Image (cartoon, rainbow, N blue to C red):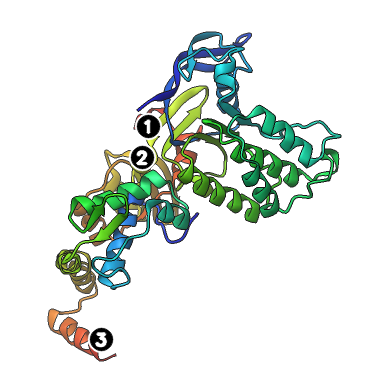
C-alpha cells in the first residue's frame, strides 16, 4: 500500500527521511514551505497522525520550523546540517558494510581502494 | 485523549461456547483502528456488541461514555457497515442515499454524490440488480458520507476489485484528514490497510492478543535466513515464532528487537535479516501450530 514504504521500520521515520532527502536534493529549498501532513498522508496513503509525527521529528531537530497559521518551512542551514549527519551515517552504513563483504571475499584494502577509484571514473 | 469506547472484562457465551473471554480495551477519539484476526476469532461479535446488536453475557461496555442499548444519543453518532450489508431489494441507490441522509446527522450529500461518480454506480438501478461489488461500494459510500463520529467497517469489500478498494482507502484518508473521526476497520487484507492504521487490535480465540500502536508493531519481528547451524546459534534463546528449513538453509522469524551489533554479527555469519510485514506477523501469531506463549509481546 502506498509508494515506497518498507516494512521493517516505523513509517514516521521513513517520512522524516523522505523530507530530509528532498531537502538535501534541493527539491525543498531552505525557507520553502513543506507539504502539509494531510498532503503527505494522502500521497503516501498513511495515517495523518503518522505523517505529523514524522514532520515533528524534524521540527524537534530544528530542520523544519512552524509559521503559525501558515505551515511548516525548511530552516536556513538545514541542508548543511543534514549533509553532516548523513556523512556520519555513510561510514556506518556503507563503508563498514563494504569492508566486511570485501574481507569475506579476500579483497585487500589496496584492491578495494583501486576499485573505488575505478568506480569514480564510471 | 477522550475514550470513545471502553470495554471492561467483556464476556459473550452461546450456551457452553465462549466467544469472547474477558476482553478489555479502549478506543480513543479520532484515530483509525484495525481490528484484525482470523475467521471466528470474535471480531464481528465485538462489533455487534459495540453497536448494541448483541447483549454481553457479562462485563462492562460504554460507547461515548454511555450504555449503547436503545440509546439514541449513542446510536445516532455511529455508523456500522457490515459485511454483506442488506438493503431493501426494491430500493434504488438514490433511495438508499435519501434514507442515509435522514439517519446520519453529519451526512454530506455532495460528498456522497462525488463518491457515487468515483465508484461509477448507476444511481437509478435497484438493489436486487446490483453486483456484489456494487453493493459493497454502496456500503462504503454510506460509511464515508455519514461522517459519523464513530464509523465501523466490518470487512466492507466483498466482491470489490483492487481499483475500487484503493479508491476506498484514498477517500477514507483524505476525508479523515479533513474531518477527523474514529474509524474501526475490520479486515483480512492487512497489508493493504496497515499503513493507514494508527492502532491495531488482534483478536484470537475470543481474546485480545495484540493492543498496540501500529508504528510500534513495525520492526517488532524480523526474519533471519541462512545456513541452519548459524541461524540456530544466532537465534538461540530468542523468542522464535516460526521456523522453516530447506536443505541446509533455515528461515526463522524472531519476535523482539535487533540491535546494530547483532545485525553485523548476523552479516558476518552469512545470515540475511529481513523485515516482517504486519500481515506476516499476525499470521505467525495466530497460527495454531505455534506456541501461544510467544504472543506476549
Q: State the CA–CA distance, disc 1 to disc 3.
A: 48 Å
What SS does tag 1 mark? helix
- Which residue is at the front of the view, A36 or A80? A36
Q: Where is residue A49 shown, x and y percent of the image? A: 38, 44
CB atoms of marks 1 and 3 within 8 Å: no
| Residue at the (18%, 87%) spot, across then down | A114
Answer yes or no: is residue B262 visible: no
Give a yes or no on whether discs 3 and 2 share a subunit: no
Say which quarter of the image contains residue A35: bottom left
| Residue at the (25%, 50%) spot, across then down | A57
What SS does tag 3 mark? helix
Disc 1 sits on a residue from what chain?
A: B
Disc 3 sits on a residue from what chain?
A: A
Name the residue carrying label 2.
B240
| Residue at the (49%, 28%) spot, across then down | B203
User: Considering only vertical position in the picture, is A105 above or below B175?
Assistant: below
User: Considering only vertical position in the picture, is A42 above or below B185?
Assistant: below
Report whether A36 appears left or right of A79. right
Disc sitting over residue B294 in the figure: 1
- Which residue is at the front of the view, A113 or B108? B108
Q: Where is residue B260 shown, x and y percent of the image? A: 20, 53
Q: Where is residue A26 shown, x and y percent of the image? A: 28, 73
Say which quarter of the image contains residue B81: top right
Report whether B63 appears left or right of A73. right
Name the residue carrying label 3.
A119
Report whether A102 appears left or right of B218. left
Q: State the CA–CA distance, disc 2 to disc 1.
A: 8 Å
Q: State the CA–CA distance, disc 3 to disc 2.
A: 42 Å
CB atoms of marks 2 and 1 within 8 Å: yes
Amino acid at each position: 500500500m502506498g509508494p515506497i514504504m518498507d516494512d521493517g521500520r516505523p513509517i514516521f521515520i521513513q517520512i522524516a527521511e523522505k523530507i530530509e532527502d528532498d531537502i538535501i536534493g534541493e527539491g525543498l529549498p531552505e525557507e520553502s514551505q513543506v507539504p502539509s501532513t494531510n498532503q503527505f498522508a494522502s500521497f503516501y496513503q498513511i495515517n495523518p497522525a503518522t505523517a505529523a509525527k514524522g514532520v515533528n521529528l524534524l521540527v524537534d531537530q530544528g530542520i523544519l520550523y512552524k509559521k503559525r497559521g501558515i505551515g511548516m518551512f525548511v530552516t536556513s542551514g538545514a541542508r548543511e546540517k543534514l549533509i553532516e549527519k548523513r556523512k556520519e551515517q555513510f561510514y556506518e552504513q556503507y563503508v563498514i558494510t563494504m569492508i566486511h563483504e570485501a574481507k569475506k571475499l579476500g579483497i585487500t584494502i589496496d584492491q578495494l581502494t583501486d576499485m573505488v577509484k575505478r568506480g569514480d571514473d564510471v | 485523549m477522550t475514550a470513545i469506547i471502553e470495554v471492561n472484562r467483556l464476556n459473550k457465551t452461546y450456551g457452553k461456547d465462549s466467544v469472547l473471554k474477558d476482553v478489555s480495551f479502549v478506543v480513543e477519539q479520532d484515530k483509525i483502528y484495525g481490528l484484525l484476526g482470523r475467521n471466528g476469532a470474535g471480531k464481528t461479535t465485538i462489533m455487534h456488541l459495540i453497536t448494541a446488536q448483541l447483549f454481553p453475557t457479562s462485563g462492562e461496555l460504554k460507547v461515548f461514555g454511555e450504555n449503547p442499548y436503545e440509546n439514541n444519543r449513542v446510536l445516532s453518532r455511529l455508523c456500522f457497515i457490515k459485511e454483506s450489508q442488506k438493503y431493501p431489494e426494491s430500493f434504488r441507490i438514490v433511495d438508499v442515499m435519501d434514507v442515509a441522509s435522514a439517519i446520519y446527522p453529519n451526512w454530506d450529500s455532495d460528498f456522497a454524490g462525488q463518491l457515487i461518480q468515483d465508484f461509477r454506480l448507476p444511481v437509478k438501478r435497484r438493489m436486487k440488480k446490483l453486483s456484489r461489488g456494487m453493493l459493497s461500494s454502496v456500503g462504503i459510500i454510506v460509511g464515508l458520507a455519514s461522517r459519523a463520529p464513530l464509523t465501523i467497517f466490518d470487512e466492507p469489500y466483498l466482491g470489490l476489485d483492487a481499483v475500487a478498494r484503493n479508491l476506498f482507502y484514498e477517500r477514507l484518508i483524505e476525508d479523515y484528514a479533513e474531518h477527523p473521526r474514529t474509524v474501526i476497520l475490520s479486515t483480512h487484507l492487512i497489508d493493504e490497510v496497515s499503513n493507514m492504521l494508527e492502532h491495531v487490535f488482534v483478536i484470537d480465540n475470543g481474546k485480545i492478543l495484540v493492543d498496540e500502536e501500529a508504528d510500534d508493531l513495525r520492526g517488532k519481528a524480523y526474519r533471519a535466513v541462512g545456513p541452519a547451524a548459524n541461524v540456530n546459534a544466532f537465534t538461540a534463546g530468542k523468542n522464535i515464532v516460526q521456523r522453516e528449513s530447506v536443505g541446509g538453509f533455515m528461515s526463522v522469524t524472531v519476535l523482539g528487537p535487533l540491535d546494530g551489533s547483532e545485525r553485523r554479527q548476523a552479516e558476518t555469519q552469512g545470515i540475511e535479516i529481513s523485515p516482517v510485514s504486519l500481515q506476516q506477523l499476525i499470521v505467525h501469531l495466530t497460527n495454531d501450530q505455534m506456541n501461544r506463549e510467544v504472543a506476549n509481546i
